[in-house]
Amino acid sequence: MNLKLTGNHVEITPALRDYVNTKISKVTRHFDHVIDVSVILSVEKHKQKAEANLHIRGKDIFVEADSTDMYASIDSLVDKLDRQVLKHKEKNLEKRNHQTLKDQEFD
């Protein structure tokens, strides 16, 4: 998995980079077919915003979250991203299991 971390009007410190790495690893624990992740951290007045674009085989997932604290917005972002990835994984399993011959009815 490739992780691209950029900051708009915010400096990416090593502590912030490590925090994002550990949180994104939670997503890869649930779904290991992640190709790359692009995370953008930005500051607009009093709003700390985090955006992520996750590229997996066959789909791109985009999630954004904002808060007054950057670490809180990263936590919210990872929770949303995790829910989206699990939803995609469940859809793929249903699709794959639905197409088996044993589930089809023959006349």
Image (cartoon, helix red, strand yellow):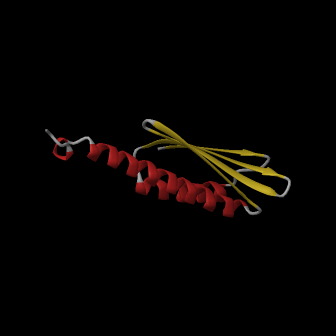
Tally of numbered discs = 0
Q: Position of residue 106 (x, y in %)?
A: 14, 39
Q: Position of residue 8 (x, y in %)?
A: 76, 44
What residue is shown at x 68% (from left), y 51% (from top)? 50
In the foreground, 72 or 13 = 72
- Is residue 89 visible in the rendered image? The answer is yes
> In the rendered image of this protein, does residue 42 appear above or below residue 26?
above
Q: Position of residue 65 (x, y in %)?
A: 67, 54
> In the rendered image of this protein, does residue 83 appear above or below residue 95?
below
Left/right of residue 92 with respect to residue 81 in the rendered view: left
Q: Position of residue 91 (x, y in %)?
A: 39, 48
- Is residue 32 visible in the rendered image? The answer is no
What residue is shown at x 40% (from left), y 44% (from top)? 33
> In the rendered image of this protein, does residue 79 appear above or below residue 55?
below
What residue is shown at x 69% (from left), y 54% (from top)? 13
Q: Hey, which residue is sitting farthest front in the picture? A: 107
Q: Hey, which residue is sitting farthest right in the picture? A: 45
Left/right of residue 93 with respect to residue 85 in the rendered view: left
In the foreground, 99 or 44 = 99
Q: Which quadrant would residue 98 be assigned to in this image?
A: top left
Instruction: For the C terminus, give its image quadrant.
Output: top left
Q: Hey, which residue is sitting farthest top in the picture? A: 58
